[in-house]
Image (cartoon, rainbow, N blue to C red):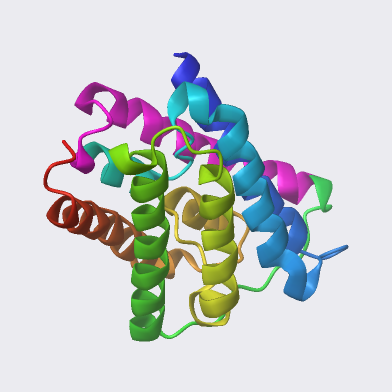
Amino acid sequence: MKKYLVEFIGTFFLVLTVGMTLIEPHAVGDLAPLAIGLALMIMVYAGGHVSGGHYNPAVTLAVWLRGRCSRADVPGYIGSQVAAGIVAAFVVLGLKGDPDVSANAIDVFPALIAELIGTFALAYVVLNVATAKGTAGNSYFGLAIGLTVTTMAFAFGPISGGAFNPAVAIGITVMKLAKVSHLWIYLVANLGAGALAAYVFRTINPEDK
């Protein structure tokens, strides 16, 4: 139960930061990816020792397929993450005074590719810095994970919105930053990328069981 609570808290602050930095009033514009990446880094350091600090169903899928998360924990992790994304979205809307938000216009195919690449990068980094035997005990895992999200958000945010996380995708949909009809793009690309990252990790590191 403690692991699921930590996953809820970490995902909550991640999605909260997304909404608070992107929605007017007092949005931070082009600096939003930096704030979002820092929020993830902070929460990974805060809760990583308890739950692994996934805060992302795609990462949970990747870590499970890699063999470092039990099948029994997967529903609890993903349920906690999705619930946190929804709660955070409503908190943002309340704090912002129920703002009039217009969803970003995106093209389906470029958005799919952008989300696939960005989420793959994130899941691949997580597997290598937070689960690999060769990097066990390092102190930089949170920084690497947070900066991956920052980098991918700067690179692909204008194309797809830069979710790289189904819980974030659901949160931005509730906040009306993304269209409901586009939610499938994030779910397919993000979860597919998580599975691909696990496959690539296991191919490169066959001895790291």
Main secondary structure type of the part rendered in magenta: helix
Q: In front here: 44 or 92? A: 44
- Residue at left 53%, top 53%? 144
108 part of magenta stretch: no
Q: Position of residue 70 (x, y in %)?
A: 24, 25
Q: Position of residue 127 (x, y in %)?
A: 34, 47
Q: Position of residue 138 (x, y in %)?
A: 49, 38
Is residue 29 placed above or below 22 in the rendered structure?
Answer: below
Q: Position of residue 49 (x, y in %)?
A: 50, 25
Which residue is farthest front? Answer: 134
Q: Quadrant of residue 105?
A: bottom right
Judge whether residue 87 can be spotted in this image.
no
Dividing the image into 4 quarters, which one contains the N terminus?
Answer: top left
Is residue 49 placed above or below 125 in the rendered structure?
Answer: above
Judge whether residue 124 can be spotted in this image.
yes
Q: In front here: 66 or 132? A: 132
Dividing the image into 4 quarters, which one contains the C terminus?
Answer: top left
Is residue 98 placed above or below 33 in the rendered structure?
Answer: above
Give the number of marks: 0
Q: Which residues are magenta?
A: 65-94
Please indicate whether residue 23 sits to the left or right of residue 187 in the image: right
Please indicate whether residue 29 sits to the left or right of residue 190 in the image: right
- Residue at left 44%, top 54%? 165
- Residue at left 82%, top 53%? 96
